[in-house]
Amino acid sequence: MFCDEALDAVEAIASNDLAPDGRVAAHLSTCPNCAAALVSARALEQMLQRRPAPSAPSQFTSRTLARVRRARWRNDQFLDVGFNLAIGAVVLAVLVGIWVVVDRSGVTTVSNQAVDFLGSRVIAFARRVAPSLPLYLGATGVLASVLGIWWWAERDARL
Amino acid sequence: MDHGNESDLVERCRLGDEDAFQELVDRYKDLVFALIARTVPDRSRAEDIAQDVFLRIHRGLPYFRGEARLSTWIYRIVANVCLQDQTRGRPSVSLDDDRHADLAPSGSDRQFGDLELRDRLEKAVARLPANYRLLIAAHYLKGVNYEDLADALQLPLGTVKTQLYRAKQQLRRLLETELK
């Protein structure tokens, strides 16, 4: 048997994971270098087993919990800002949508005419505007829903 | 800690019970800190990393499915955090370096004498590759056996044993050559 083979088994023997078989035992009894390696490995094994395990500092739990709370607060803030930005973007999109709908349906022009021809033209104005009313009501409903969700989310976050 | 208590504690933590999380920290802080302090020589840095581990545990608990034991899952997080910390760069440590002086020996350890040799051991351990250091640190902590290590590191049992033997072989050679 060569020293390399015996030396490969030294750590396993020192930690009692391996019982030296006949060949290894014979080699260890005749080779001073390998025998010294086994002695050294056993000494190291004992030192590692006696190595002290450092305890956590006394304030560790409270400091850790404070850090967890801070991280959670930061995370909540981040989500809150992100949510508010998203809601703002949706509200803006709804407002732009309403403006486009109003502009394309010619309500602005109609409104100007209505101001000019108040009185006798009110009924005619109402007739012209009436077809666009469902669109206005729909847009208002979307806006109200968005604001409602916003309010609900803010209330939930405060609880 | 039996499995029933463990799953109950995890469930309470998941529901946002801060007392339950405090209980979890109290139960595992010494194990986590000892593991990290054995791989990271600087005690304040070790505390910082240990807090990182519990932060990750807090974030990860909603996704913990209970397939592994809680302790195994925690070891895995410790291993990941330690190995990530090592990849950020670690100064090489000489066996004559005094930076490990803050790892003060306990009273019982003094009975075994030869503090200088133990100091050398700490410095030699600090010079091992990160994965070897973690294996040595974990294996010689009470209650962490080969099977737990294999589960935590997601390695076959044979690989864990082989790596551990290689780590100890390297450590022995470091001590033998550098002490001469």
Image: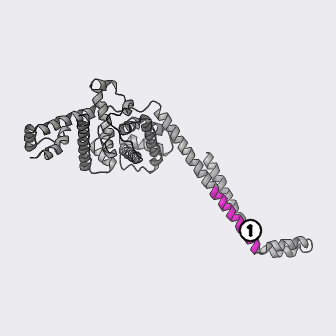
Quadrant of the rendered image containing residue A115: bottom right
Instruction: Count all numbered tags in the image, as a single digit.
Output: 1
User: Circle 1 marks a residue in which chain?
Assistant: A
Q: Is residue A2 visible?
A: yes
Q: Locate the N terminus of chain B by quadrant.
A: top left
Q: Nearer the viewer, residue A46 or B120?
A: B120
Q: Position of residue B13 (x, y in %)?
A: 47, 43
Q: Say whether residue B91 is magenta.
A: no
Q: Main secondary structure of the magenta part?
A: helix
Q: Is residue B143 visible?
A: no
Question: Label 1: few (<14), some or many (≥20) within 10 Å?
Answer: few
Q: Which residue is mark 1?
A: A99
Q: What's the magenta region?
A: A85-105
Across and down, in percent, residue A80 comes to 61, 51
- B123 vs A149, nearest the viewer: B123
Relative side of B82 to A92, left or right: left
**Residue A17 as seen in the image, left or right of residue B63:** left
